[in-house]
Image (cartoon, helix red, strand yellow):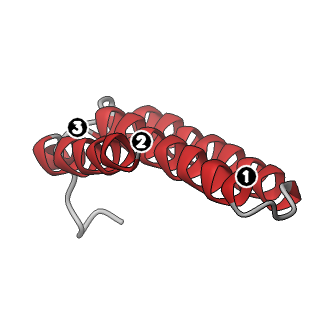
Amino acid sequence: MTFSLILMFMGGLFGICMSRKHLLLTLFYLEYLILSLYFSMFLFLLWYCCEIYFVLIFLVFSVCEGALGLGVLVSMIRGHGNDLLSSLSILVW
């Protein structure tokens, strides 16, 4: 089980490294990393018989992070026309 969690996390990190120019794919891989962390935290707290309310708080924060990322993506697409990071210039901001 631990090996599969480590494999999920490393796969998400590898995906972020490979899709560094496309913002939507980067957000998808970031949500995948959050999901793997959520699953590992849930199993850790379940294994040690601790309070599982922290998992609910973590889930709320991860949903807020996803909504904020999508909001920034929509704002960037309206301003620039695409979500490729290579077409952005730092001098424009």
Q: Which residue is mark 3?
A: 22
Gap in angstroms between the C-alphas marked 1 and 3: 36 Å
Vertically, is 91 above or below 1?
Answer: below
Q: Which residue is mark 2?
A: 1
- Disc 1 crowd rating (10 Å Cα; few below 14, some 14-19, many 20+) is few
CB under 8 Å between discs 3 and 2:
no
State the quadrant of the N terminus.
Answer: top left
Residue at the image point whose x is 23% and y is 42% from the top = 11
Which amino acid type is shown beneath numbered disc 3? His
Residue at the image point whose x is 83% and y is 55% from the top = 52
Which amino acid type is shown beneath numbered disc 2? Met
Q: Earlier in the sequence, mark 2 or mark 1?
A: 2
Q: Quadrant of residue 83?
A: top left
Residue 35: tell me if it is visible. Answer: yes
Dot 3 lies on which element? loop
Residue at the image point whose x is 76% and y is 54% from the top = 55
> Looking at the image, which is closer to me, 72 or 79?
72
Vertically, is 15 above or below 48?
Answer: above
